[in-house]
């Protein structure tokens, strides 16, 4: 078993339930196609990483999807909001004696294996690694022990999440990775020909 664990939070790719903000502009069919491509991209940059990996599903576990069981363990998210669900996933990982745990989502086309590898490395000398997103949230969170306040009293999905998280860890040693852009609205897709091909 690796001492490093990567948690990948995903939504089940169901019509009308993914990329809802994007769907307002391009429709549910195209939004679903974009999200499926984002899932495939997430698989591409994670499958060869030298760490253990768990895919956390939003609705139900699919044993026959793109996440092969030899590479990824599969779990179901549990909790009444995003913070609670992430906290529970970290708790589970630390209870299994992992030294470093990183969580990412599945809607970052620009995230790379190198960024994740660096984040694990930076945890050697930092308490927390955080990846800021251009919309005011974050796309990556890494820790060596659970810090409950990170997951509490947040307005998830708003532009205040990153700044309020920094306040929670102002007494910790923190490394920030490069800022990246989530794919939430049509303008987020401008620099990505592959995603634009679905429009």
Image (tube, rainbow, N blue to C red):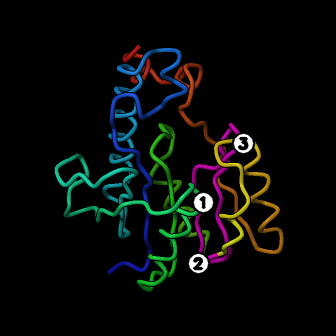
Queried whether the magenta region covers residue 139, the answer comes back as: yes
> Where the C terminus falls, by quadrant?
top left
CA gap between label 3 and label 2 equals: 24 Å
> Where the N terminus falls, by quadrant?
bottom left
Check disc 1 and report the residue beneath it: 83
Q: Secondary structure at mark 3?
A: loop
Check disc 3 and report the residue beneath it: 136
Q: Are marks 3 and 2 in contact (CB under 8 Å)?
A: no
Q: From what the image shows, is residue 74 above or below residue 171?
A: above
Q: Earlier in the sequence, mark 1 or mark 3?
A: 1
Which dot, 2 or 1, sits closer to the camera?
1
- Judge left or right: residue 153 versus residue 90: right
- Judge left or right: residue 175 versus residue 194: right
Check disc 2 and report the residue beneath it: 144
Magenta residues span: 124-146
Queried whether the magenta region covers residue 70, the answer comes back as: no
**Residue 57, position in %: x, y?**
37, 54
């Amino acid at each position: 078993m690796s001492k490093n664990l990567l948690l990948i939070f995903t939504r089940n790719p169901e019509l009308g339930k993914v990329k809802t903000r994007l769907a307002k502009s391009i429709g549910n069919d195209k939004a679903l196609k974009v999200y499926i491509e984002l899932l495939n991209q997430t698989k591409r940059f994670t499958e060869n990483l030298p760490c253990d990996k768990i895919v956390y599903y939003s609705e139900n576990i699919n044993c026959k999807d793109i996440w092969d069981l030899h590479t990824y363990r599969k779990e179901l998210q549990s909790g009444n909001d995003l913070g609670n669900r992430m906290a529970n996933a970290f708790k589970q990982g630390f209870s299994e004696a992992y030294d470093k745990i990183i969580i990412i989502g599945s809607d970052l086309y620009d995230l790379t294996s190198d960024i994740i590898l660096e984040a694990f490395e930076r945890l050697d000398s930092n308490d927390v690694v955080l990846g800021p997103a251009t919309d005011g949230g974050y796309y990556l969170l890494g820790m060596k022990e659970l810090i409950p306040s990170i997951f509490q009293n947040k307005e998830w999905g708003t532009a205040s999440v990153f700044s309020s998280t920094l306040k929670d860890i102002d007494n910790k040693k923190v490394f920030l990775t490069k800022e990246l852009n989530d794919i939430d609205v049509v303008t987020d897709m401008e620099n990505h020909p592959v995603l634009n091909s679905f429009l």
